[in-house]
Amino acid sequence: MDKVEEFQKYGKEQMETATATAGEFAKGVQAIMTAYGDYAKKAMENGNSFVEKLSGVKSFEKVVELQTEYAKSSYETFIAESKKISELYVDLAKQSYKPFEGVMAKMGQMPGTTQH
């Protein structure tokens, strides 16, 4: 009977952990969505700025120069924002798993369980 009570206790702890983790998970997802929104806004602003500059150009050489600058800037922004968003995903994964580490360790210590 003690094993059943222990198992129920661990189940309750897991449920409490899952509930607490849901709030942290939501915050992480919100941070990721905000980062995507910020990147989209930057990309739109850079594109609009490029078109404005391009509309005032009189020579082909200047068009090529502006296009090159825009491409380089867009690429650098993409790489920086991608890295930032990737790090947010990694943090989200770590935060989501962290509360379960203790529970899993306890489950491994339960009598009658084996560790692989």
Image (spheres, rainbow, N blue to C red):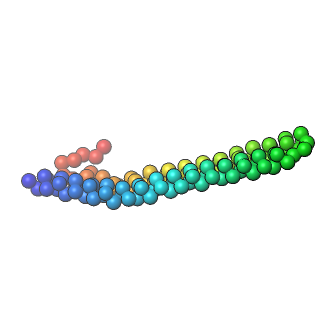
- Seen in the image, is 88 located left or right of residue 45? left
Left or right: where 32 falls relative to 83: left
Answer left or right for 96 relative to 18. right
Give the image location of residue 47, x and y in percent: 71, 47
Occupied quadrant, residue 17: bottom left
Q: Is residue 105 visible?
A: no
Pick whichever, 78 or 109, lies toward us.
78
Q: How far across and how far down the image is residue 45, in percent? A: 69, 52
Residue 53 appears anywhere in the view: yes
Q: What residue is at 81 percent from the left and 45 percent from the top? A: 54
Q: Tell me what residue is drawn at x 13 percent, y 52 percent.
A: 4
Q: Nearer the viewer, residue 66 or 5?
A: 66
The residue at 41%/55% (across/down) is 25
Looking at this rendering, what residue extends furthest in the left direction?
1
Residue 112 shown left or right of residue 115 in the figure: left
Residue 75: percent from the left, percent from the top? 70, 45
Question: What count of labels does the image hold?
Answer: 0
Image coordinates for residue 50, horizontal then vertical, percent:
76, 48
The residue at 50%/50% (across/down) is: 89
Task: Check the picture and name the quadrant holding the C terminus.
Answer: top left
Camera-side residue of 85 and 55: 55
